[in-house]
Structures are given as C-alpha cells and as structure tokens.
Image (tube, helix red, strand yellow):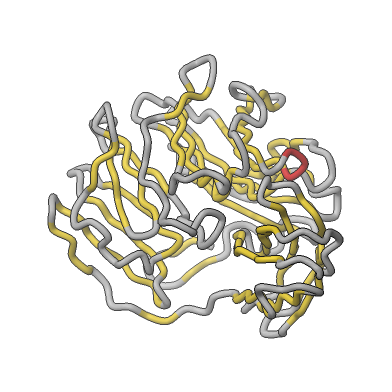
Amino acid sequence: MKFNGTTWRTVGNAGFSEIGADLFFMAISPAGKPFVIYADNQHDYKLQVMMFNGIEWETVSTLGLPEGDGGNPTIAIDRNDSLYLSYSSVMNNDKANVYKFNGSKWKVVGNANFSNYVAEGLKIAFDPNDTPYVVYEDYTSNEVATVKRFNGVQWETLGKLDQKQPGSIGGEPYFPNIAFDRYDTAYVAYRGAVKKFNGVQWETVGNPDFNAGQDSHPIICIDGKGTIYLVYHDGSLSALKIEGENVNSITTEFPIVQPTVKALLNPFTDKLIIGYTSPINTIAKLEIFDANASKLAELFDSHISGGMLYQAEYLPQGTNSQLLFYRLTMGGQSYVGKLIYQGKR
C-alpha cells in the first residue's frame, strides 16, 4: 500500500500474487519502482520477484530452487537499478547466498553458501559506490553479527564485532541491520548497540547498551546530514535519533502485537512441547536443529490462523544429553530458541 498524505491506498490490485505468497520482502528502486520477492508455496516455494509498472504487478523472474530451499529471502536494488536477492539455503544448513539479475536470469554473486554456518537474519545493502554488503548472525559463532563485503571475486569479512554473552550462543537472536552514511561508513545496529566501522575496527556510536539489550529487530537509517535513526521493538515500538554521543527518543511508544513461541518442559527428557501463536493468518514452519545446525526434525509446515494457540511435540531419538535449537518461521520472520535435552536414563 502507498500513503497519499491522508490515507493508505492499494498499489495495483490487491492479492496480485497467486494464493500462497509467503516470506515476502519489498524494496524501492532509485527510479521509484516497487519490487517484491516472496516464496511461492503453491510452486515448491520458488522465489518469485515482481515489479509494479505503474498500472499492475508484473513478474520479473523466478529463481528456481529445490523445494523449500529459499529461506528468509530479501531483495535490494543498487543505484544503477541492478537487482539483487539474498536467501538462506535451508538444504545447506541455512548458509548465505546472494544472486544478481542480469536482465534475463539470476547469477550467483561470489560463491554459493559462503557463510560458515547458519546465516540468521541475512540482509543485503550497498555502500555509495554500489559495493554489496551482507550482515547476518552466525548462530553457531561467538559474535553478535558478521558483516561481509564483496570485493569483486569473493565475500570478505569486515572486522570483528562484539562477542556474545557467555551462554547466549544460539539463544536470543541479535537481529543485525546495516546502513551507510554519505561518506561510505558502514553502521550496524543489533540488540542493544550501534557500531560503525572506522576502516580498521568497529566502534560504538552513542551510548553503549542504550536499551540494556531489551530491543529487537532494529532498523537503522541515516539521513544526508549523518543523523542516525533507529526503530526497534522492546515490547512496544520505539524510535531513537542519534547525533554524536546523544541518544534521544523521538516518538511515543505504542503497543504492537507480536507472534509468540515458548518451549514447555525445557530442559526435557522424554518429549518436548512447543506452543506458538500468530496475530494474523500466515504459514508457519517449526524445525529442530542440533548444535551443528543440522536439522533433526520438521514438526510443522502449514497454514495457521491468527489468534489461535498451536502446539507441536518433539520426541528425541538419541540417548545422550545435548544442546538443541528450535526455529519457528512465520510472517517473514524467524524465531530461534535454545533447548536442553537431558538424555534418557
């Protein structure tokens, strides 16, 4: 939808995709054209890209992946109107992939599956020179986020960010996001902090730990004057403006409705029950992984109704105690939590 200054108006026809558009994401080109990407669950979850031509939505291209492989897709457009997409390959331990559209087909940028392990919350952005960057949380590493830059041949890591708190690896995600100022400086926002890259290392911007790590899903934007704006969820939706060392609230908080997920009987021995809800009708997928990011079970993958409580049961097969993780994907977002299997005696 588009806001005309007074009300929101539908862009093109409502329901322009086939039934079953899931994990959608939108971007606006420098020419002002809206693009969307989504997983088409009626056609083996292939990634579908569409553009609004001023009258109607038309298909740009389809990236044919193995069924269900295109996890958490995003789309981005550089200043030359070149179209990129990113996704986490479900069939390759959710490793990161970036493709570029050459006008007729999609070409992989650098190597396929270039992250070490799970690329949680993968996003792509461009600096003022149109160099592609990605940011994600490697769910099996000690770092809160990984930033990589494509050097024309391969993806290279940009410095080292903060270490996670002891015991938090694989726990509550940090939801990293990235933006650039007009001087080509990269900024990364994640749970509880904003950092910028000074060419050698990442340094803190504003007050460290501005919200005691209680924020999630931060979105960072930088205006032409270098003022940083940050929107995040901390039980309500909040926004901050960062100018130098000053961090100021610029909006009144207001409550929003979030999906919920909770592992019952955790730690567990014989069986685990996971309860989850969504505020809207959507498609939910619930999976169990081990500490090496190998999928052990898929507990659910289907439509759910908003406001309803759903429960799934997991029966472990092994006898040895181990650390596990669940991942619930719905509404275009993933929610990951730690599980402790104490083993059967």
Give the camera-side residue of 98 and 14. Answer: 98
Whether residue 161 is visible to the viewer of this picture, yes or no, is yes
In this view, 204 is above or below 181? below
In this view, 120 is above or below 21? above
For the image shown, how many numbered marks are present on the structure? 0
Q: Residue 44's spot in the image, x, y percent?
A: 85, 48
Q: Is residue 5 left or right of residue 81?
A: left
Q: Quadrant of the C terminus?
A: bottom right
Whether residue 57 is visible to the viewer of this picture, yes or no, is no
Which residue is located at x 65 percent, y 65 percent? Answer: 339
Which residue is located at x 47 percent, y 55 percent? Answer: 175
Q: Is residue 332 left or right of residue 27?
A: right
Q: Residue furthest bottom?
A: 308
Q: Is residue 176 left or right of residue 307?
A: left
Quadrant of the rendered image containing residue 131: top left
Q: Residue 156's spot in the image, x, y percent?
A: 47, 24
Q: Quadrant of the N terminus?
A: bottom right
Q: Residue 288's spot in the image, x, y percent?
A: 74, 59
Give the camera-side residue of 38 and 159. Answer: 159
Q: Residue furthest left?
A: 245
Q: Residue 96's spot in the image, x, y percent?
A: 61, 37
In this view, 268 is above or below 322? below
Which residue is located at x 82 percent, y 61 percent? Answer: 319
Which residue is located at x 50 percent, y 30 percent? Answer: 81
